[in-house]
Image (spheres, rainbow, N blue to C red):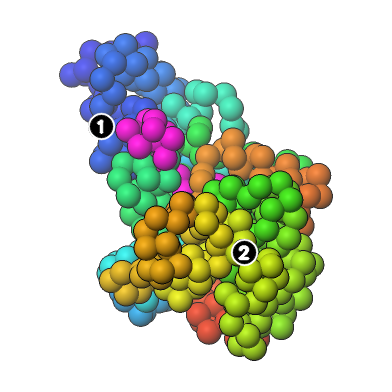
Amino acid sequence: MLQDADTCHFLPQVLQSATPTCGLGSEGKLCSEPSCVVELVKVAHESRLKSEVRPMLKMMNCFVMRGVGEVGMMEKAVPRPGPCDAIIRTTAALVCTSDVHTVAGAIGDRQNLTLGHEAVGVIHELGEVAAASGLFKIGQRVAVNAITPCYACDNCQRGYSSQCGGMLGGWKFANLKDGSFADYFHVNNAVANLAPIPDSLTDEQAAYCCDMLSTGFVGAEHADIPVGGSVAVFSQGPVGLMATVGARLRGAGLIIGVESMPNRIALARKYGCDVVVDFTKENPVEAILKLTGGKGVDSAVEALGSSATFGACVSATRPGGTISNIGYHGDGDSVPIPRLDWGVGMSDKTIRTALCPGGSERMSRLMRLIQTARVDPLALTTHRFPFTDIETAFRMMRTKEDGMVKPLISFV
Ligand SMILES: [Zn+2]
Ligand SMILES: [Zn+2]
């Protein structure tokens, strides 16, 4: 039963966060529909009346960015969910080069921010509104995309949910709030952002959907590859390799990878590159022009995040073609475009950009591709570490020593 506002100590908290735009709890805004708020308050309040007294504050281990260039382990309280949120107990995570960029200061300083955005686990706690949805249960295995939009703001409604609330705003983990390199992590807007993991998939397989498959595949989706067309994928790191798989799935007739490291060249061939150009042995633009009869490729995917590579993508793409950028340009004030190869700005070449699309619907589709053996991401796992040794994994991800492609972090 809903009590009067002044006799319900829980009501102000609900009004503050139990709304369709409650992305970051207290930073959210009220829904403008009075009936919506009343219904949410009712559900949340009745659920609260039935619930038991909250347990004592529990502590957990986290791997944090202490400041620019400095990382380490620290203890924090296990987070609690707002009404629309969930708390996940982490079981498996992957370290990303983006984490390395972040610690290097690419998005500014952060103090004691928990790193990590590629993780899966089991539901530990659900907020009242998320629980009332009936879609999830405690103990259920779920994957959570690196990007967790609210799906209610202007940009989300315009179809650009990765830009939720502002540019790159869908990227909350290890950017706007604590990430998932912790025993537990918080997920906003749980109903839209939790994706159940099918029984036939391991945690490790599902973890690859959080960023590697989603980002790699959007690189191919945005590249607008004609069926049978040609595509060049610059850099065959984990994201580039998944862009290669995406290009194959999208019907490319010729896939040219650009890479120099021998283990990555081998993976590029395994994942679908017809030719791999070693840019340390030949000019990649000249090699691509030669492979396409002097025309250039229909589409180029930038999966590294370097000005030189981006410029090469523009130069190697034929007029009317598409350059799809998924690389994280972590330094410099600008990314130059080669003027003449851009047709002095009139070449009909399209440049598209994307940040890892999120949401449970896309996550489920990505997991289906693994279930039906359209892609096997496990060859990307070159190293394994327990969570207690994540600092070693992080250091090796920075230097890429010992042929590291992706390190899997296991939690017990
Ligand atoms: Zn990532
Ligand atoms: Zn949004």
Residue 168 screen position, x and y as percent: 36, 51
Q: Label 1 amino acid?
A: Lys
Q: Earlier in the sequence, mark 1 or mark 2?
A: 1
Does residue 294 sit above or below 92 in this rendering? below
The magenta stretch is 144-160
Q: Main secondary structure of the magenta part?
A: loop
* Residue position for label 2: 295
State left or right for residue 378 relative to residue 364.
right
Seen at 52% across and 52% down, the residue is 320
- Give the quadrant of the N terminus: top left
Q: Which residue bears the numbered disc 1?
A: 29
The residue under the point 39% across, 33% down is: 158
Give the spatial CA distance, label 1 vs label 2: 52 Å
Residue shown at 73%/42% (left/top)? 368
Q: Residues within 10 Å of mark 1 (few under 14, many from 20)?
A: some
Secondary structure category for the residue under label 1 = loop
Q: Mark 2, residues whose alpha carbon is within 10 Å: few (<14), some, or many (≥20)?
A: some
Return the residue found at the far bottom.
281
